[in-house]
Amino acid sequence: MSTLTSVSGFPRIGQNRELKKIIEGYWKGANDLAAVKATAAELRAKHWKLQQAAGIDLIPSNDFSYFDQLLDTAILLNVIPKRYERLAFADPEDTLFAMARGYQGDKGDVTALPMKKWFTTNYHYLVPEIEPGEEIKLNSTKPFDEFNEAKTLGILTKPVLIGPYTFLKLARGANAQKLDYDKGLVNAVAAVYAEVLTKFNELGAQWLQLDEPYLVLDKEPGDVELFKTLYTKILAAKASVKVLLNTYFGHIADVYETVNLLGFDGIGLDLNEGREENLEAVAKYGVASGTTLFAGVINGRNIWRNNYATSLGLVDALKQVTANVAVSTASSLLHVPFSTEGETGIPADDLKHFAFAVEKLGELKEVAVLADATEDEKKASAALAANQALFDGTRVASDPAVAQRVAGLTADDFVRQPAREERQKLQREALGLPLLPTTTIGSFPQTKEVRAERAKFRKGEITKEAYDEFIKGQIDACIKHQEEIGLDVLVHGEFERNDMVEYFGQNLNGFLFTKNAWVQSYGTRCVKPPIVWGDVSRAKPITVEWSAYAQSRTNHVMKGMLTGPVTILNWSWPREDITHEEQTKQLALAIRDEVLDLEAAGIKVIQIDEAALREKLPLRKSDWHVKYLDWAVPAFRLVHSAVKPTTQIHTHMCYSEFNDIIRDIDAMDADVISFEASRGDLVVLDAIHDAHFETEAGPGVYDIHSPRIPSEQEIEDRIYEILKKMEVEKVWINPDCGLKTRGNAETWPSLEHLVAAAKAVRAKL
Ligand code: GLN
Ligand code: ZN
């Protein structure tokens, strides 16, 4: 029998982001729900057919979602907090959107569920909230409907669900409490999955894929027991449908033996991120006789071509242990863009090094065919020869001057003088800010008008002068508005930037850009990471002119706005031929040049965003420092270590879950940090308190990911919560992230409430 091919999941947003457009249209009232459903069905059909045409054996279904697959799982299990049910929408989709985005209207006023990053990706999931006494039951027919929909098209798919273990580990109780995995809850969840299994059996599915990425994390006491309890119950319901236990984003060496003994028909292993450990575990414990190993060899996290020789070697290594090996994507392809087709801006000679989701289907198939080929057939294979040639040739643009500069760095380059406490005193005098200073994270709403002007400029329809005039107008208006509502530290609004990473990439040597390589970040929001193609250096000053212009228009302190090296790398497609550490150092030197130029241009406060620093923290604790923090934190220090003591360095992080690395964050040695904390729980405030955090901090006082306008009272309450845990001298008042994706209609009233709340609290101090 020939080697089976399996895709863990396929991007759902559409080649031209059709799903985004139609859903956002629905939110704005431009089209109805029926139109959303019709587009969704078209996209699903298109994606299934593409995979069928590529010769994929196990094509996923139920990998589609209107917003998030974990939210779908919660709804499937009837995990819907009462406050959303009370809105009493006629359509379940409206309840779903209320859980995802919050709701403010004639039916009520509720905040959204908290949103968190999906493991080490830039994809965000909604945190399921299981209220006490919640009745867990099968509550939706979505997985069955989509399976039947594909079946009608003549495609027998492999339904995909997030497994019960990962679901329970990511879910929270009411008020963000940690869940207590009591017997009733665990049994009820297992019972629903068993029912799903039975149902798919009836429907004639051959494989069911249960994703358990949480298995790649360190285990807490009770975790393995929980996993075993769940699956012993679920697998007891098994009849003819085969169950693939799928893992990704790391290795499961610590539970492989247990998993192998449970009697799954398939075990999916990530041979990209968890390679060595997974291979060792398989070699050590073997593979149960009825189990097929799904070798995750096609990288679902990066866009460089697969090296077939390497993949074949991995398949071979598994074949030493068992004959039952299938090939698969290492994770869902959700995290890569749709297709390289149409990327005419990149020279064909460069583009041939990349494979997006559609091209990865072809790679998967070719690897499977080669895995079955004899040595002679391999020698004659044009596909293998072409692939080999790609990796034999030179791929990237190298620059010896960059290598030299990195090699010349000394320990002093990573240390800022004098010590922070001293600096903070000097800065207080120099900047003359009130207690609880108010500020924003940088960007203001990028209206249709702003995007239209940029498009015109890009297409050459308006001159650079006209475009610059337009941006200046936006900056002027934004500054005036900020002054009017009484913010303390102003920003210019970032109107000139399409994106906080792409904008910098465009002004650095060593990057390539795509036209349409979007990947989903949260809900309908997508990002388009640039590609690190060679050694990186700064081509010319990037932001200096805009920041200096903005400062010239106001007597308030104007904050300069940069993206940090770790974030630029994490939100780009990194090179695979040199380490991330090396690439980050190159980026740090480039941004350091910009910091010093901003300071020389009279900018007194400079924010260096490290929005994505926490995102790529390795999933296993033992890897945190050696594989990441030991170079990521120093890279940030390298960026700002040479500024004057009175220049205030801010940073921003889009994440609240850094309580466990709080000392490392402090060691970045910024003067001020702002972070997202309004949608998450408040644990990080405890951590700040307990760690005697030295950096001044602005834990976001309202959630910008929701269109909801917070009341002044709400913000005031939140400030008091913060003041319970932090010294007032160290607290900043700001929203929890940039305002770029919001509209002006909700932004300005929200900020007015923010300023009013800060003033009210200040008056009572
Ligand atoms: N300065 C950026 C902005 O306001 C930060 C965005 C982010 O952290 N994602 O848009
Ligand atoms: Zn942010």
Image: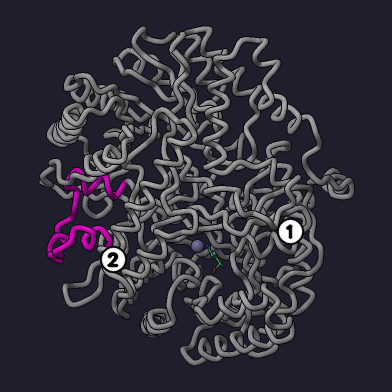
What scheme was used to colour the molecule?
A: one colour
Residue 429 seen by the camera: no
> Dividing the picture into quarters, in which one does residue 750 lie?
bottom left
> Dividing the picture into quarters, in which one does residue 574 lie?
top right
- Can you tell which mark lies on residue 102? 2
| SS class, disc 2 | loop
In this rendering, is residue 190 above or below 478? above
Badge 1 amino acid: Ser
In the rendered view of the protein, which quadrant contains the C terminus? bottom left
In the rendered view of the protein, which quadrant contains the N terminus? top left
Residue stretch in magenta: 70-97
| Badge 1 residue CB within 8 Å of ligand 1 | no
In this rendering, is residue 617 above or below 211? below
Report the front residue among 401 and 35: 35
The residue labelled by disc 1 is 641
Residue 89 falls within the magenta-colored stretch: yes
> Residue 474 vs residue 294: left or right?
right
Residue 375: x percent and y percent? 65, 10
How packed mark 1 is, by other alpha carbons closer than 10 Å (few <14, some 14-19, many 20 or more), is many
Residue 166: x percent and y percent? 32, 36
Q: CA distance from mark 2 to mark 1?
A: 41 Å
Asked whether disc 2 touches disc 1, contact meaning CB atoms under 8 Å apart, the reply is no
Ligand 1 is found in the corner quadrant, namely bottom right
Residue at 46%, 8% (x, y): give it.
322
Residue at 47%, 16% (x, y): give it.
2
Badge 2 amino acid: Gly
